[in-house]
Image (cartoon, grey):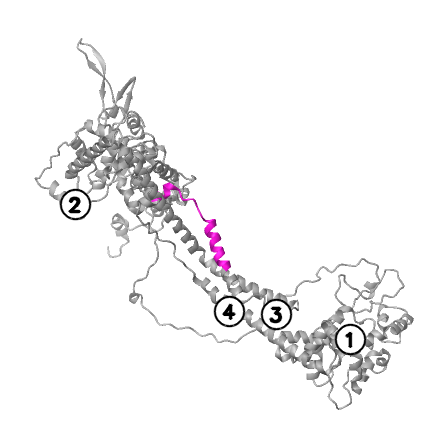
Amino acid sequence: MNPTNKDLRQAIDEVAKNATKQLATYERQNVVRSQLPCSVLLLLIAPLLMVVLQALRWSLGLGIGEWFSWTAQIALSIFLPVSWLAMQAWRNKKQIHRVRALATMDAALGSSERVVTADQFLRYDSRDGFMQAAVEDAAKWVERGQRKNLNQQGNKVRLGWSMMAIPTAILIMTIAAWLAGLSRIHDASSQHQQRASLPLMDGAAVEQQQKQPKPRDDERADASPPEEHDPKTGRNRKRKNTVATLTPNAAEESRGRLTDGEASESQQTSNPSNAQGDPSSQGQPADSGEQTPRKPKKPKNQTNTEERPPRQAEEEQEPSGATAGQGSSKGSRNSAATSDWASRGQEATPDDENVEDEDDVEDEDEEQKSRGGVQPNMRDRRAPVNRDLQIGFGSNRPNPDANGRGGPGGQKKSRGVASLVLGVPIPDRINGQPNKGRIRVTQQRVTPEAEESERVLAERRAPRTGNVGPIHHPTLSPWLQDIVRRYFLARRKGASTEATLPIQTPTSATSPSAESNDPQS
Amino acid sequence: MSSTLPVDNPSAARDAASEFREVHAAVHREVARMMVGQESVIDGVLAALFAGGHVLLEGVPGLGKTLLVSSLSKAVDLNFSRIQFTPDMMPADIRGTNVLTDNEAGGTKLEFQPGPLVAILLLADEINRATPRTQSALLESMQEKQISVGNRTIILEEPFCVMATQNPVEQEGTYPLPEAQLDRFLFKLVVGYPAEDDYRTIIRRTTSSEEVELNSVTDAETVVRLRQVVRSVPLPEHVESEAIRIVIATQPGSKYAPEIVNEVVSLGASPRGVQGLILAGKVRALLNGRFAVAGEDLRAVAMEVLRHRVLVNFQGMSDGVSPDDVIAEVLANLPSVEA
């Protein structure tokens, strides 16, 4: 290798290094530009995570707390997109080949690949005259390439709608901070009220209050006005208050505060034997002119629970009126129509209790109150009783659930003669089939009116000026044109022979037959 | 490199390249005196002549295709022969045959009478009017540069070159060239209409008493030597890879084939296409003052080299897709060295 070639080799190395460095920077910028919209969207991750964690804390009853400072939240929000961009840039990092770098420099120099060709020829052990001439020819271009800036145009950044992620992230962080602030205000007010109530209690009460578990906290929350809090929070607390009134002590206290009319009603409900003789008195408003206060429901259940053992014993001696519908030979003093709500067939199941524990209880009370009196109870919403008639199973033991009334079940029910036939229970194939609902047909009387528009003469229509798009005009090859021409010539020839009317030709116009038909001739 | 290099030092290479450019320019200038308004066609014909290939000239009648070839023969001083192909022409009519002649002893003997094919520059005018049987008589001469008649083999003199013309419009009584013969042409040049100003020159030269006398500016020996110079131009590896990719991309179902090739091409270019690309690229590199082939040379000559080697199927013809459209799509989809 002569010195000239050696120097040229080093110079080409410099060019390759220069081009590689610029290409690597250019590719990194391209990756960052292409991934920028995605990374901007990642700004939302950290604020959303904060909100979700706060919601989880709130749902678990831990209260909304401030876990991270504003600085930490902003730092986390920015860290995710930046780390994403860095990861993408690292993942898309490619080895830039020397040939590619030199060819790019050639393109920038306009040297027609002289540099990359010279670099390749310099690696050969022996070179002919043309190769050496090509190497020497590239020397001036190599010198320019050492200082040449590639100036490659990168991809344009198109953020578009992803820019909305920035204000959205700020908004979410603001909302999270506002919720945390509300929680602190709420906690501060609660603690203040608690401190204010402490001097009124003696030491033992304070001790007891401090030892009280969560329900006491709920009661304490009840002391604070619910209007100060979130409606949902207040509703939840209100529900807990309702549950709290279901404790036995509370039931006893509420029973003691009832008016006369309500007391008689509760007694009537609790004693089924009284309802037998006077069904009309059930559900009547109290005689007293006082406004009926909110009626606690759970004492009634409590009463039923307390009276259940003696009634069970009574029913073991004589079946209820509902069992008469089974065709039992035994008579009954009780009628199914006049059976009490608390009879065996309608005895509250745990599910029913849950139903009553729901908001329906309050809705019932409010609905009755709004109607101006005591209305039929809404307990009809409970699940219908089992209709199993127990026919053909050979057991004389009365089924306590078989009262003859209908209800959803897995098997079809039967009555009358069909119920006497020994049969296999038929599964209900259409059980649970969804109903598509009512179909309402609405007819509307509309007088039809003609839509009039101005006439436009065809001559006045302007030619189309807009772009009609690409119109394809395939030019057939000559042999295809010949085929098409022959085809239509054959068609025309066939049509002329099949046509009923003769084609007007000069010979046919001057034919003797035509002249003979002419009346003037 | 090989030991038969015509040039072994850079200065000799520069001299050879300089001579090539000078001779090319002289021939071009001389032919352009007669052929007006067809610069690109003249360049293509000269490139094929110096690259050692054959040319198929396609154009409507009256564009001077025959005039171009005859002018070239005069400018290069080549043994020129013209065959007007007709449907009743037989292979023996162009190759030559043995005829019974009298000898000095008063007897008779069979003597070979060479046909018009035995020449250096052959003009096969309206080649598609001959039957495939007659057209096939050109196959051996175009590829092997020899003629086999009976037990006689005639080596054609260098620089043998066939320049054929055909009319793309008139199809009555013509026979399309078989693919085997099409593939033997280095270039297919489409002769178009001249520009408006060129019409004035054509009128002045052909309808007046002015007569253009062409002089020979070179000879066959120089052309043969310059052909060796062309073949001495080195080919870089990345350009070689690019040429291979271009040809493979024209073959349907291949690795580099774009969608249009898979849809409308029934037959792609053969290895002869790569040879043509490289040789034509070398000529272009020399003409542009370079001593090695570049990728831009291949892309510049790809249309002329490949358009008759790409066979469009019926779907492509019905859609109006020409081989030029296919090659343009191939070149557009081919990754460059910079990518």
Amino acid type of the residue that numbered disc 3 sits on in the rendered structure: Ile
Identify the residue shown where x is 47% and y is 74%.
A448
Q: Are marks 3 and 2 on the same chain?
A: no
Q: Are marks 1 and 2 on the same chain?
A: no
Residue A64 tag number? 3
Label 4 SS: helix
Alpha carbons under labels 3 and 1: distance apart: 30 Å
Q: Quadrant of the C terminus of chain A?
A: bottom left
In the image, the segment drawn in magenta is: A79-103
* Residue A163 place in picture, x, y as percent: 45, 63
Identify residue for label 2. B198
* Residue A484 place in picture, x, y as percent: 34, 44
Of badges 3 and 1, nearer the viewer stands 3
Q: Are marks 3 and 4 on the same chain?
A: yes
Q: Are marks 4 and 1 on the same chain?
A: yes
Of badges 4 and 2, nearer the viewer stands 4
Alpha carbons under labels 3 and 4: distance apart: 18 Å
Q: Is residue A50 above or below residue A212?
A: above
Asked if the residue at tag 2 contacts the one at tag 3, i.e. Cβ–Cβ closer than 8 Å, the answer is no
Label 3 SS: loop
Residue A247 tag number? 1
Nearer the observer, A329 or B138: B138
Identify residue for label 4. A171
The image quarter in which residue B69 lies: top left
Amino acid type of the residue that numbered disc 2 sits on in the rendered structure: Asp
Alpha carbons under labels 4 and 1: distance apart: 45 Å
Amino acid type of the residue that numbered disc 1 sits on in the rendered structure: Thr
